[in-house]
Amino acid sequence: MEELLRRHGGRLHACAWRMLGDADTAVEIVHDVFMRLLAKAHELRDPGTVATWLYTTTLNHCRDHLRRAATRMFRDSAPLHETHPDLAPGPHDRIERSDRDRLVREALDALPEDLRATVTLRFASGLSYGEIAEVQGCAPGTVASRLHRALQRLGETLRAAGLTREAL
């Protein structure tokens, strides 16, 4: 279990965080997923399916959490890019980045769940198309199509908000 948590915990947390927009809830989701894995470990005969099971269960827990939420509260945006540690942004840069991250977060939230999950699994969790296909129960071509549609929609939404590719 420690090895699985070390290997997948961070990416599962990133996946849940992107789906929910709340780091604390993401921690709870990942904790619940690993507790469920403890209870179900005897049913998982093929060690190769554990990673797929973890991501599928994490996405399902996120979906359940979102369904139970009666209203969607404003969520803090998580940085979608890393900055170089030597570059200390000034106050103006931090405000611009905060606004930019908020717009991107809102654009992601506006995507249908299947497209948002595909983007999250690809970019927040770093899964391959094949791995995403296993988690989502579809063909790799479907993953590519979903990712293409999601990125198109994100681009359109962000351009309409006045953001350019260079600004991201």
Image: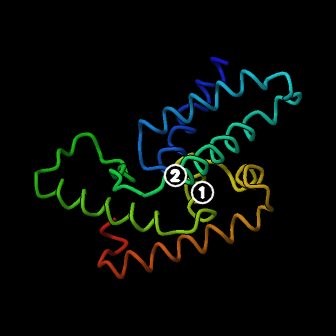
Residue under numbered circle 2: 19
Q: Amino acid at mark 1?
A: Ala
Measured as percent of width and height from the top left, residue 17 is found at 47, 45
Residue at x 52%, y 52% (from the top left corner): 19
Check disc 2 and report its element: helix, strand or loop.
helix
Please report the residue visible at 60 percent of the width from the left and 25 percent of the height from the top: 5
Q: Residue furthest front?
A: 70
Number of numbered tags placed on the structure image = 2
Q: Is residue 80 above or below residue 113?
A: above
Mark 1, residues whose alpha carbon is within 10 Å: few (<14), some, or many (≥20)? many
Dividing the picture into quarters, in which one does residue 113 lie? bottom right
Tell me where residue 154 appears, x and y as whole percent: 47, 72
Decide: is 162 above or below 51. below
Horizontally, is 120 left or right of 47 in the view? Answer: left
> Which numbered marker is on residue 117?
1
On screen, residue 52 versus residue 163, left or right, reads: right
What's the amino acid at mark 2? Met
